[in-house]
Amino acid sequence: ETTYSSERFSLTFGMAVSELAGPGSVRVLPGMLLTAWLVGLYLLNRRISWLNRLELNRLEALIMAEAIALFTLCMAPNWVQSFFWRPGMFPYFAPLVTGTFLILLIFHASQGTKWRPGLISGVFLISLLTGGFSETAVAVEVIFLSIILGFSCFQKDNKALRILPVAIALAGTISALLLLLYSPSNAARLNTSYGTTANIQSVLINSLKGGLYFYLATAYRPTLLYASALLFFSLMGLAISSRNESPAISLKHFFLGMVILCGTAYLLTAASLAPSFYVESNYPGDRALIIPRFVSICLAAAVGSLAGNYVSGLVKNRLLSILVVLAGVVIVFVDGMWLTGMDQFFYPPAHPEIRSVLKLHIWFW
């Protein structure tokens, strides 16, 4: 279907290590990557206060990490190729794993009162590794780090210490981008497999349109799954806010946060689609969409946590225990819906819009 991309140096490195480990590595590699990803998400949830308001304990951090991983995989258009098939797993799933640890390292490196050369070197190497997996990964990484660098410039305390790790990560990412672009095998691949590439203006327009299409398709196709994700993260945000006794966010700041989060997610999604529109002048294949799907789930987690914090100022304490129990029901419902709905080819089920489900399953509707 797709020629092997030898200019993706992290892909080549990952495949080489897997081959050296022997045929048995094919069976255990997906589980190892998933475990590493969960560990990274857990540590990230423990170290970072969600929206500077919610401090997660160990159980909450673990539940949030597992929920993000579950929703990402079960809503990926072709999670078999993205997760089990090595030529699809390394370019599109592995960057999610290394990218999570990259954010964690940036956070560690920006703490304290002095620069730590070891952490800074690790930031550069992991950013280079993450960008080298695929063009999709490096495009998202460049935009994400640029946004973080922009926000870091507005920090009042230890500005230089906060900017340096992000700048080093961005330098590693740009190095990976240049290696991908100017690799001799890349020029041969473009000439033999794709021919003429699209111009920059068309790429920008199509990527922005594609980002809008991605979220419209999310609202139409996996409606119940994404609604379940929003509900789950909102209930978690409500429970964590009540436990921490965090002050509820104002309505004005809630909508401001929504705009910032949605705008950031939209830019990252458009960036993930840009390489396919540049090379193929077409929407990317299903296996590449696990990266924007992860972005959309992070958006649901952030927006849900924000909404839960806002609602915590409105809901009476006696209703909280009922709502927290519903959070567990939601995750069990989604997991069961995913597993029971898979067909013999192990593709995730296509859930229609909510109205069609109600008409189908409620006889008096």
Image: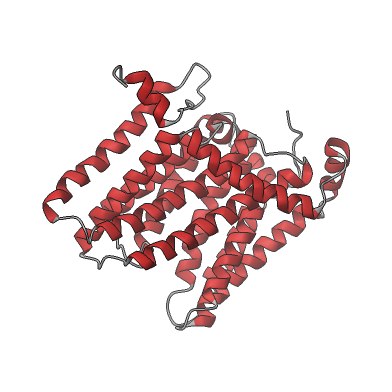
Horizontal side of residue 133 vs 329, given as left or right? right
Which residue is at a point 37% across and 61% down the rendered structure image?
50
Above or below, comparing residue 152 to residue 274 in the picture: below
Q: Nearer the viewer, residue 26 or 189?
A: 189
The image quadrant of residue 336 is top left
Can residue 179 be seen in the rendering of this structure?
A: yes
Q: Position of residue 43 (x, y in %)?
A: 39, 57
- Reply above or below: 105 against 297: below
Q: Residue at x 35, y 58 (%)?
A: 306
- Where in the figure is residue 345, as x and y percent of width and height? 53, 19
Q: Is residue 10 visible?
A: no
- As drawn, is 134 to the left or to the right of 311? right
Residue most extreme to the front:
365
Q: Position of residue 84 (x, y in %)?
A: 55, 31
- What is the quadrant of residue 196 in the picture? top right
Location of the C terminus (image quadrant): top left
Question: Which residue lies at the image location 72% right of the left edge and 53% below the top edge?
Answer: 204
